[in-house]
Amino acid sequence: MSSYLGTETRHALRLLRASLVVGGIPVKVVTVPATVLAKHHKVPVEHAPFGDCLRRSDHWRIRLQRGVEDLAMRDTLEHEYAHALDEFLNGPATEPHRKSWGACVALCHQEIYGKLHDAR
Ligand SMILES: [Zn+2]
């Protein structure tokens, strides 16, 4: 699993997990081929999303598109982690990118960038 994650993405995941715990529910991160994401979201493979976030019975499952460049994958991880955090803090979303999701993106972003230089 993590062997598919680049250095930046792995580092960001470590920071997010350490500080923004999503209700004690584990956030599992896997990489999947673009074809898997395209099929799930019913779009042509060239329009496959870079990732998604699914609620399972006992964990959150973030899927990141395999082969995406490390920094783009890190941004996608931030985007998807914010979905899990938003739903935990603010309940199920009818509009996925609601304002409270944006606030969660900001939290994730600060966590990653705020510690980027002193955590290494
Ligand atoms: Zn989204």
Image (cartoon, rainbow, N blue to C red):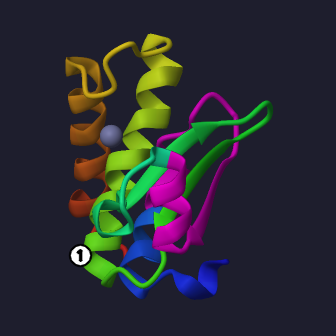
Name the side, left or right, on which 46 lies relative to 2. Answer: left
For the point 23% across and 75% down, which residue is it?
117
Q: Is residue 51 visible?
A: yes
Q: Position of residue 81 (x, y in %)?
A: 44, 46
25 with respect to 92 (left or right): right
The answer to which quarter of the image holds residue 76 is bottom left
Residue at image point 40% right, 66% down? 12
Residue annotated with mark 1: 117
Q: Which residues are magenta?
A: 14-40
- Does residue 35 appear left or right of residue 24 in this picture? left
* Residue 60: x %, y % from top left: 64, 41
Q: Of all residues shown, which one is farthest toward the right? A: 58
Amino acid tagged 1: His
For image coordinates 79% across by 35% down, the residue present is 58
Q: Is residue 6 magenta?
A: no
- Within the displayed image, which quadrant is ligand 1 positioned in? top left
